Amino acid sequence: MRLTSLAATLLACGAIGAPLLLSGCGGGDSGGGAFPWFSAPPLAPNPPAPPPAPPAAGPSAAELADCCTAGDRDFPKVGGNLGNQNYSSLAKIDKARVGQLGGAWLNRIEGGTNTGNSQSTTVVVDGVIYIESALGNLIAVDGKTGVTKWKWTTPYGAITRRGAAVAKDLGLVYTVATGNRLVALDTNTGKPVWIKQYPSSATDADYQGAVQKVALVYHDKRLYVGTNDGNRGAAFSADAATGKVLSTFWGVPRVGERGYDTWGGAPESDRTGATPWIHPAVDPELGLVYWTFGNVRGGSSQNGSTRPGLNLFANSIVALDLKTGEYKWHFQSVHHDIWDMDNVMSPVLANVRIAGQERKVVIYGSKTGMYYILDRKDGSAPLGIDEMPVKQDARQASWPTQPFPRQGAWTETCIVDQPLGTAIPGDPNRAVPNYLKGCLYDAHWDVPLLSIPGHGGGANWNHQSFSPRTGLVYTGMGYVSAAHSLTESSNGLRPPGTYMTGAVVAVDPGTNLVKWKKPMPYSLAHGNGILSTAADLLFIGQPDGNLLALDAGDGSELWRFQTGAAIAASPVAYEVDGEQYIAVYAGGTSIPYGDSAPRGDYLWAFKVGGTVAPAATPKPPEVRRPVSGQAVEGAALPTPNTVFLARVQTAANAPGASESTAVNAMTPTWMRVPANTTVTFTNPAGNANQHCATQFFEGRFDFKLAPGQSAQHRFDTPGEYFYNDCHSARPTGKIVVY
């Protein structure tokens, strides 16, 4: 087989079938190395691990001590334990009795509100549940009776958070508030013990980043606090008794710090992002804390042209010393990200058997649909991760390789083009028509390039679960394609009309191979955490309000219950007075279903024989990505039952004066007509280009119209019909037939 020059170079450098170290193969030589068109910084994509020690008796008993023992009766932190395993050793609710689960109690913690964004997961300590609401408040609830014990009402306004932290030994529970505040409350009364306000300006010498929309982890008199402001943030530790900052590690290095030279001389305005905003994992035996850092935010996250290089520590997992915050090792899962494909989800610690040896690993990932299985002592890859060539665009200064686990991904990584009218509804990797189609890591520029998994995953900030009983790691995921280009102001376009579905995936971390995958009707990548239990059950909530119990062995459904609102949190298990409970908070979030996802303030607990009836079934989310704008009746338009292509709709529902490729460049974007109505599609004479109305996915019509031309279609069957444009796929409209 004839190799391209790039592939031949990579093969000579050991990239195919073995890790590639670019700096040792001419990658840093701008004067004629392996990649003469690219000047790489003198740093390998991922630092080589120390040479393996000679085979010995194996790890010591202390080294193999499980840092992640599940609580006997409680669920003391988000993630369940320090290893974020989301596992409970409780087994009284088993496969024989899970079908008998009913509501033990329901607490509308904010009195019945149905608004806001809730991304918080419950924690349970000594039978008391602590939950943060969308309004910014923290509520303590008796886990047996469901009665509110106390409520701290914030004076600082609403804020999105991802779960409180409890220091049982200090009698404190922690949350965050607007204004960059860390709040410590008395666990018995809910009264503030102290409130620490950190600097909120990047010009302040003591600025750490914004403590908002972030995660808190407590261990051994310290809080581990992430930051997220879309600018530049740090992973820091603080004294749990005072909030005083004890150690700091910046996701974007300052001058003179490790990794600073991986930004290719980029201006400070483009050295932003890489914020660590989700729960780290903690290994007390090794004395390490594992943080995951987000993507670059400078300018546009889609544009890498002004920041050549790896851009550390964006898109990386970094191991730090628990006490000093000293850097120990890192692994970057996406180099020079231009897709918002950061793998920012809580890393999971596990002890697994690989090639006959017990290994202490960290499971990292994954928006990219891949698990990066790393030795948690040194960051090496016991199952192999190779730097492989990917499609380039020199204008993007894109990195020539990306790391791929040798076992491959656990989801599709290329979009599939299927003829109109032949696709199966909801087919996860089906392409919306008229887009340029590609694969994960294909470089883009000014033309939208459609790929999968999109920037919502794969998996995202949903909490994953590792069961020591089954030896499997479980995750919810989403099937939502994304189109990337410089024309997108944020993180890529989820094409209007695309299906947004998902799956539950079980992977064996000892082999990094899929054990089973269960297709699901909704994306489960945003807050939809999985709980595994010692009874080999899985619990996961859906955006339609249903809480499900699945068999951990094969994913088959065993039970479901309607909670009343979208679930964007992890279910938890606990025990009070010998009775086992499952609890979940159903509050709802806008990701990825926007305002169509039902909201609420439903804190539920379930037990065998519970008698509280399910909530009323809310309107389910819109599974297809909506178009812009509001519905208008076709007969009421200034030109009845007519669509004008490539024109943005005015306030009077008339076409705008100029040609456009905006997403909302259909007038109207959303038309309602009764069945058997004939609709006219017109390319206005003032347009300079041919435009199309391509209906997908059923293929009912595909009009290609020169300026001044029109075509008609009679809609004889009720339903919704999306269509877009061949000149630019972004403009999308919808006809709803009733």
Image: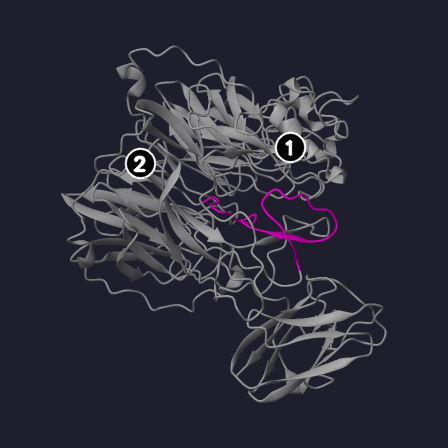
Residue in the picture at 66% in, 58% down = 435
Q: In which quarter of the image is residue 323?
A: top left
Taking depth in this image into account, of 490 and 17 the one nearest to the observer is 17
Asked which secondary structure carries label 1, the reply is: helix
Taking depth in this image into account, of 451 and 55 the one nearest to the observer is 55
Q: Mark 2 points at which residue?
A: 76
Q: Position of residue 686 (x, y in %)?
A: 86, 73
Label annotation for residue 587:
none
Q: Name the residue under label 1.
A: 7
State whether residue 233 appears in this view: yes
- Position of 636 relative to 502 (above/below): below
User: For the residue marked with disc 2, what is the amino acid?
Assistant: Pro
- Position of 591 relative to 182 (above/below): below
Q: Where is residue 563 in the image (x, y as percent from the top left)?
A: 33, 60
229 displayed left or right of 558: right
614 displayed left or right of 644: left
Q: In which quarter of the image is residue 440?
A: top right
State whether residue 647 appears in this view: no
Q: Does the magenta stretch include residue 375?
A: no
Distance Cα–Cα, label 2 vs label 1: 50 Å
30 displayed left or right of 165: right
The region drawn magenta spans: 435-461
Q: Does the magenta stretch include residue 445?
A: yes
User: For the residue marked with disc 1, what is the amino acid?
Assistant: Ala
Q: Where is residue 277 in the image (x, y as percent from the top left)?
A: 51, 37
